[in-house]
Image: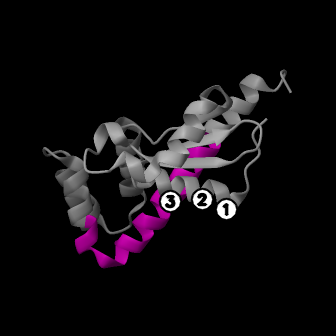
Amino acid sequence: MIQLSKGQIKSIAGDIEMGMKCYCNLDTSEIITLPDFDNNSHVEEELWEKDIKRLNDNFHRYITIEGMSSHKSFKVMMEFVDSIADQKLRERLIYMMDKPHPFRNFKNEITDSFNYLEKWNKFKEDKTIEWVESQINEYNSIHKSEG
């Protein structure tokens, strides 16, 4: 069974929001965080050599904590838009999300709406924490009879 502190979960959520990959040791709950080398050719693997070796030597003892899919991330954005009281902003965001590059459009629009930027960042953080917790709970639920 995986047991992580609230601090660990918040840290993992922040790391996956930045595009990192997180791995949790099933025995110790130690977290290894690595760049997504597949999607980031500018990162030098040599800088992460110790963690990569530790992970590869015991890969079967780690689970990967995944970031949200783009589909799930889009749903989170829509949930936030639905919660906005400012009708004009809500309509602008919906319009921008209907165009090509909805994530970039949303980010640009919400950044221009400073009053809602902080609310969006908190909302997204909370949803990402819930996402991480759901993966841990799912793993624990599936494997609870093994412990």
Q: Is residue 12 visible?
A: yes
Circle on res. 7: 1
Q: Residues within 10 Å of mark 1 (few under 14, many from 20)?
A: few
| Colouring | one colour
Under circle 1, the secondary element is helix
- Total marks placed: 3
Under circle 3, the secondary element is helix
Of residues 97 and 37, the one nearer the viewer is 37
Q: Position of residue 78 (x, y in %)?
A: 36, 49
Rendering quarter of residue 37: top left
Q: Which residue is mark 2?
A: 10
Q: Position of residue 138 (x, y in %)?
A: 67, 31
Rendering quarter of residue 6: bottom right
Under circle 2, the secondary element is helix
Q: Residues within 10 Å of mark 2 (few under 14, many from 20)?
A: some
> For this view, does 23 lie left or right of residue 4?
left
Q: Amino acid at mark 1?
A: Gly
**Magenta-colored span:** 110-134
Quarter that holds the N terminus = top right
Quarter that holds the C terminus = top right
In this rendering, the answer to whether 118 lies above or below 100 is below
Q: Is residue 91 visible?
A: no
> For this view, does 107 lie left or right of residue 95?
right
* Residue at screen point 42% across, 53% down: 47
**Marks 3 and 2 in Cβ contact (< 8 Å):** yes
Mark closer to the chain start, 1 or 3: 1
Q: Which residue is mark 3?
A: 125
Mark closer to the chain start, 3 or 2: 2
- Kindly report the distance in space between the C-alpha atoms of the residues bearing marks 1 and 3: 13 Å
